[in-house]
């Protein structure tokens, strides 16, 4: 009876994670978060397949690719969070190479090191490598949580901002606990009680069903796909008035030049709430991130400063400070991202072009 119930739980878990993986793959046509999200789901499914009792004998040669996929689940978790919460952050070749390395080392850990360790035949270097991998995997989990939290204060997309908190609380805490339990089981040669595993699988099933509904419900939403831009949503009368005050402050008061300006400070100066400012900048001005909004206005100001012949001897650092940046590094990165060249190159080309015209 216990074994039959365990099979039912694992079958439902694999089916639900597989369903979610399919939906995420379909979303991959619209969002860079789709592929790593699908791989994360498939890796979770592989975990519940390979962690069943007697799986090594039952799976035969399939145990190797499934184990390799399983151990990379935290890598895909990090990449999924990175792509989901940061515009323009997709999969790169280096990520796949890193995941492949983790897959090889993790397969060695699970299928070669563990039997040696439990039999008391593991060498010191094997123990260091085996337990060191668990530390690396935990770092990937924490990195995924960091990606979800990093831009929380400057995210202007309301649905994505709300999702960050749920992602941290549900997915992150669950994965951290699972990885921690696995590490303790490895260290003390123990196993997780079957009832606890069933509870974990039940939570995964519910989470997958909710996430699947969420994805199907948001097919027409653009927050998950930065390439589609910001949807045109009409502002109400209060928001329209705040937008007018904001534009006036930008043009006449140059409010964007204040160093360290936050959404809360801007809301206070405009005499309204943070949520209104976020909505106004997002839907009224087309920005998904508060820092991007500031960069656009500050770099525009910097271009004007750098193009003035009478300011040719002013240092780039001085220009950076004047337009609201606290460091030359941040200014150079923002400028090159938006203009395609460094501030020094821009000044040289602009001033040379102006002198040539005369």
Image (cartoon, helix red, strand yellow):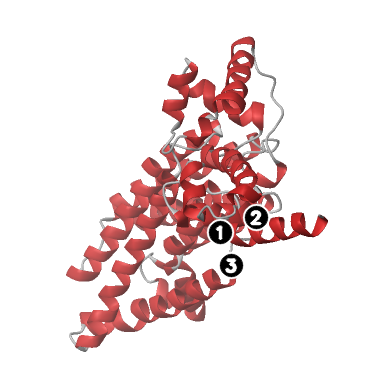
Q: Position of residue 119 (x, y in %)?
A: 20, 84
Q: Residue at x 62, y 39 (%)?
A: 223
Which label's residue is closer to the chain start, 1 or 3?
Answer: 1
> Residue 15 versus residue 6: which sits nearer the camera?
15
Residue placed under numbered mark 3 in the picture: 92
Q: Earlier in the sequence, mark 2 or mark 1?
A: 2
In what quadrant of the picture does the C terminus appear?
bottom right
Q: Is residue 291 left or right of residue 108?
A: right
Pointers 2 and 1 in contact (C-beta within 8 Å): no
**Residue that mark 1 sits on:** 36
Relative to the observer, which residue lies in front, 272 or 270?
270
Above or below for 85 versus 244 = below
What is the spatial separation of the Cα atoms under label 2 and label 1, in whole angstroms? 9 Å
Label disc, if present, on residue 25 of the rendered structure: 2
Asked whether residue 236 is in view, the answer is yes
Q: Which SS class for mark 3?
A: loop
- Label 1 – label 3 distance at C-alpha: 11 Å
Q: In the rendered view, does 161 fall on the left or right side of 142?
A: right
């Amino acid at each position: 009876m216990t074994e039959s119930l365990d099979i039912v739980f694992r079958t439902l878990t694999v089916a639900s994670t597989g369903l979610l993986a399919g939906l995420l793959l379909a979303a991959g046509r619209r969002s860079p978060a789709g592929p790593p999200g699908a791989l994360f789901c498939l890796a979770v499914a592989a975990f519940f397949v390979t962690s069943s009792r007697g799986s090594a004998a039952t799976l035969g040669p399939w145990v190797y690719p499934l184990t390799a996929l399983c151990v990379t689940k935290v890598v895909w978790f990090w990449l999924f969070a990175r792509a989901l919460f940061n515009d323009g952050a997709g999969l790169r070749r280096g990520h796949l190479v890193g995941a492949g390395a983790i897959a090889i080392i993790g397969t060695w850990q699970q299928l070669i090191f563990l039997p040696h360790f439990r039999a008391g035949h593991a060498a010191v270097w094997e123990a260091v490598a085996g337990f060191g991998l668990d530390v690396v995997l935990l770092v990937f989990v924490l990195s995924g949580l960091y990606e979800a939290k990093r831009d929380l204060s400057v995210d202007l997309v309301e649905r994505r901002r709300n999702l960050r908190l749920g992602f941290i609380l549900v997915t992150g805490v669950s994965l951290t606990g699972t990885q921690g339990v696995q590490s303790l089981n490895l260290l003390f040669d123990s196993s997780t009680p079957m009832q606890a595993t069933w509870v974990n699988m039940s939570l995964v099933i519910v989470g997958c069903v909710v996430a699947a509904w969420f994805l199907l419900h948001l097919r027409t939403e653009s927050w998950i796909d930065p390439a589609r831009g910001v949807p045109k949503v009409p502002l109400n009368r209060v928001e329209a008035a705040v937008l007018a005050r904001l534009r006036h402050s930008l043009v006449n008061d140059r409010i964007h030049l204040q160093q360290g300006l936050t959404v809360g400070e801007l809301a206070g100066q405009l005499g309204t709430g943070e949520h209104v400012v976020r909505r106004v900048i997002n839907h009224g001005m087309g920005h998904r991130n508060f820092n991007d909004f500031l960069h656009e206005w500050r770099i525009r100001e910097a271009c004007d400063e750098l193009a003035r012949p009478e300011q040719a001897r002013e240092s780039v650092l001085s220009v950076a400070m004047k337009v609201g940046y606290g460091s030359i590094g941040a200014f150079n990165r923002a400028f090159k991202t938006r203009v395609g060249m460094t501030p020094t190159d821009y000044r040289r080309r602009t001033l040379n072009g102006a002198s040539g015209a005369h």
